[in-house]
Amino acid sequence: MAGLLLLATPAWAQETGSHALALHGKPKYGPDFQHLDYVNPDAPKGGEVKLMAFGGYDNLNPYILRGQAAAGSGLVFETLTTSNGDEAITEYGLLAETIQVAPDRTWVAFTLRPQARFHDGQPVTVDDVIWSFDTLREKGHPLYRTYYADVTKAEKTGEHTVKFSFRDGNNPELPVIMGQLPVLPKHAFASRDFATTTLEPLIGSGPYKVVDMQPGRAITYERVKDWWGKDLPINRGRYNFDRIRYDYYRDLDVAFEAFKAGAYDFRLENSSKNWTTGYNVPAVQNGQIVREELKHEDPQGMQAFVFNIRRPIFQDRRVREALNNLFDYEWTRANLSYGLYQRTKSYFANTELASTGLPSPAELKLLEPFRGQIPDEVFTKPYEPPKTDASGNIRQNLRTALGLLKEAGWDLKNGKLVNGQGQPFRFEILLVQADMERIVQPFVRNLERAGIEAQIRVVDSAQYQNRTDNFDYDMIIERFPQSLSPGNEQRDYWETSRADLAGSRNSIGIKNPVVDKLVETLIAAPDREALIAATRALDRVLLWNWYVIPHWHDTVYRVAYWNRFSHPAVAPKYGLGFSDTWWVDADKNAKLATSARRTGP
């Protein structure tokens, strides 16, 4: 998601259309650039790549709340502008050829490329843009209503120009947000309900289209040979695979074994156990499978055990702090994560936006008006999650936890934690990935030592999505992704208005007026320094309210792939770039095929 926008001199004003919007400073690539630095502009096109997806799907429209969207469905559609992996906070024209921003920041206008076409040959028009905006806000996923809440009007101001007007000039990210608008073909939805799930392939304008599917089991995309945008500098050297197929697996252990057997080609490895112990197979030893660690600078956000504070048992901050003491991260890292990963200590991990130490003067200026409404620790202590010595002995943490629970009205009686009415402390941890049980079970055992009964329930992906959309859980494992320039999306994560809206990303259920005000301060930040201060202040308030039990993050991508691919020598700073910058290497592919015949049955 985008955030604060600072244009090149003069700030904000663009009297004529520009090819790009830089969130601060100038775009890296000028109007005459030929290709991105991290691509091979002469990369050969061709070949098929097989990938893994988890769970199932029942919908090809990724812009609505209902159903489970198919993996890769975003490849079909395009937006007015697009980002790139070299710059975290710059947008370049895609469907839009030029972008113009008002000097007072009250509107943005996009002029479409006349050659832009949907897959059926129909031109992409201003009417399509306006219809997409209105439809997403009225019938799309609920997040769009919040995301576009400050947009007052979309209007046609020229044959190829659309203008979006804003409520005021106090939301600096809105020009970028509107550039991220997906543009859908109005004519293709004339006889269908946009809000209803569909398995009929939709028409887009992007580099791929759906050519084959087995609902819930597999889906295949084919590169559009006459794609209108293939020669744009922003796209040169990208989208090189002729076909991309996703096969669905309902068991991640089965999926891992399938990869090693050659059932699919590329794997982003998120399991420390698999990475450390699971690749001792002949295909790795003889070079048929390549393993790489690729460094990145991606913001890591927050992955954590998430409390649903809509539940009465989790509404007391002391209870949440107590349970933080019962998660033994140090033992988990040493014994289950093989020493990989870093403890996450911020909702904006791996960025300059993460709070550290004590609040700066700029942060204090934002926080002081709320003294007495937010935890005192915000002002007096650097945030640190509870620690252990990794031995598995959590006696001191247990003592701390039981003290906090007693303060909150819970007592340990006959080995069971109960409240004043004799009701036991009992909750469920809802999972969709069975492989996470190995991480959760030691936590459950520590909870039992405090007299807390926690049950693990693993459900399929459809049931999990339905339950999480409707906040029907006690605790889940959730990740809050972030960008280097947070903005409007923070409303959906944290604000009171989103807490009871089905499908919102306020999975915690936060209804905190201080958080609401800090989010709005962040969104309205006038410059980068103000954005950093506001984000760090928000981070501190979230952390010291103990809304989650933080997990971990990493600064490398661990990938494994069958040795039929090549990739550019220069990697993007942000993102992996596999699907859009790698290619099938004909020589490697032939060599792999020969070795497979030689070693096969």
Image: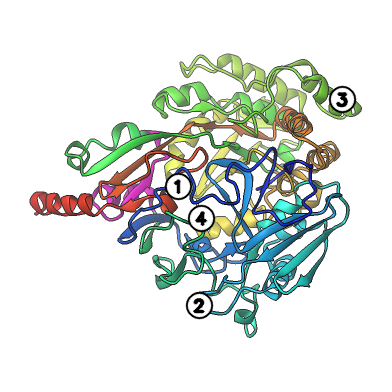
The magenta segment is 251-272
Position of residue 415 in the picture relative to residue 555 (left or right): right
Q: Residues within 10 Å of mark 2 (few under 14, many from 20)?
A: few
Q: Earlier in the sequence, mark 4 or mark 3?
A: 4
* 266 falls in the magenta region: yes
Position of residue 305 in the picture relative to residue 355 (left or right): left
Identify the residue shown where x is 54% and y is 71%: 204
Label 1 to label 4: alpha-carbon separation: 17 Å
Q: Amino acid at mark 3?
A: Lys
Q: Could you tell me which secondary element the residue under label 3 belongs to?
A: helix
The residue that label 2 is drawn on is 200
Color style of the picture:
rainbow
Residue extending furthest toward the front: 32
Q: Residues within 10 Å of mark 4 (few under 14, many from 20)?
A: some
Q: Is residue 311 visible?
A: no
Q: Which x, y percent locates residue 518?
A: 82, 37
The residue that label 3 is drawn on is 365
Q: Amino acid at mark 4?
A: Pro
Q: Residues within 10 Å of mark 1 (few under 14, many from 20)?
A: some
Identify the residue shown where x is 74% and y is 53%: 175
Q: Could you tell me which secondary element the residue under label 4 belongs to?
A: loop
Query: Disc 4 or disc 2, which is closer to the eye?
Result: 4
The residue that label 1 is drawn on is 577
Label 4 to label 3: alpha-carbon separation: 45 Å
Q: Earlier in the sequence, mark 4 or mark 2?
A: 2
* 438 falls in the magenta region: no
Label 3 to label 1: alpha-carbon separation: 40 Å
Q: Amino acid at mark 2?
A: Glu
Label 1 to label 2: alpha-carbon separation: 28 Å
Residue extending furthest toward the right: 369
